[in-house]
Amino acid sequence: MTASQMTGLTDPPSTPTVSVEPVVLPAPYRGEDLHVRVSAPVTGTHLPIVLFAHGFGSHLDGYAPLVDHWASHGFVVIQATHLDSRRFAIPADDPRKPHMWRYRVQDMKQILDELDHLEASVPALAGRVDRSRIVAAGHSFGGQTAGVLVGLRVTDPATGIAQDMSDRRIMAIIQLATAGKGGDELTPFAIESAPWLRGQDFSHITAPGLVVAGDKDELPLSTRGPAWTTDPYTLSPSGKSLLTVYGGQHSLGGIAGYEAAETTDEHPGRVALVRQVTLAYLRHVTGIDHTAWETAQAALAGDSHPLGRLESR
């Protein structure tokens, strides 16, 4: 069964892609070089960029169901391996541990600063990238990373200060199964293992954004259940959209990778829905085409679609 048959939505024609990795960038702020993967279509010009942040423990080779789809439909997708990746196996007593959230944001800014180098690393890509259209996206921990780039204020557990670390080069965000607000709703496990979740302020996120949440995403971080992951939508200023994936757990059917061990709700239909709606949103928010986004909004309005619901405010 094709994606269109599963979801009732249609993608534009795809294009072959090329990926280059690792492109190594110096990152003295974190004590390890930054390894980056760049994926791009082999044809096309004025290509927008998606800057993608992986979830806790993952790496630059993850999320192929999304990355491959976006790249094959006209986007340059850039991924890094952040310091919390299992590939580094940073010990629990490493003094960098409390600063993992901050290093991630610095990684993304380092990538933006090195776009000349990254563009030149991919054969025939130079001169085909539109740097005025950059969208930050991320799953789980990566959703917080993307949010910080457009104004999410995180109270640093080391200093108690919530600093503005936004970057004007980012025009919009996509946050997939990411964290909600902190406070009394956090579990003891969250306070110990992810202290950077204690204070999150969504009120400064004025950039447009799409939030994707699974209605069965029971995380050990909050006492509120799946509704917690909708906070980036409900607590942000207007100009946001929310895709609720029915039956979706934290991997939203398997977006973290093909046959990824952490996927507990493997479901091709859910993955097809997420990648089609996110692509439609990317094309909409970057001004390429609005038709697919309008079609998705109509098809997923209310509770009539078997896979999910799409709402905006």
Image (cartoon, grey):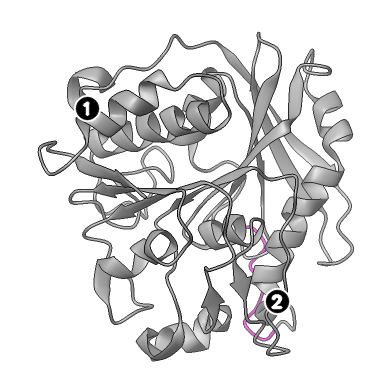
What secondary structure is the magenta-colored segment mainly?
loop
Which residue matches tag 1? 7
**Residue lying at 75% horizontally and 56% vertically, measured from the top left:** 107
**252 left or right, relative to 155:** left
Circle 2 Cα neighbour tier, 10 Å, few/some/many (<14 / 14–19 / ≥20): some
Could you say whether the residue bearing mark 2 is in a helix, strand or loop? Answer: helix
Give the quadrant of residue 40: top right
Q: Amino acid at mark 2?
A: His
Q: Is residue 48 magenta?
A: no
In the picture, the disc for residue 85 is none
The percent coordinates of residue 70 (x first, y second) are 51, 27
With respect to residue 120, does 89 lie above or below?
Answer: below
**Residue lying at 79% horizontally and 12% vertically, measured from the top left:** 124
Question: Can residue 37 be seen from the camera position used here?
Answer: yes
**Residue lying at 42% horizontally and 35% vertically, measured from the top left:** 278
Give the quadrant of residue 160: bottom right
Closer-to-camera residue (34/8): 8
The percent coordinates of residue 6 (x first, y second) are 19, 25
**Residue lying at 48% horizontally and 60% vertically, measured from the top left:** 237
Closer to viewer: mark 2 or mark 1: 1
With respect to residue 196, does 232 lie above or below?
Answer: above
Question: Can residue 85 be seen from the camera position used here?
Answer: no
Circle 1 Cα neighbour tier, 10 Å, few/some/many (<14 / 14–19 / ≥20): many
Question: Magenta span covers which residues?
Answer: 87-93
Give the quadrant of residue 57: bottom right
**154 left or right, relative to 245:** right
Which residue matches tag 2? 99
Closer-to-camera residue (201/198): 201
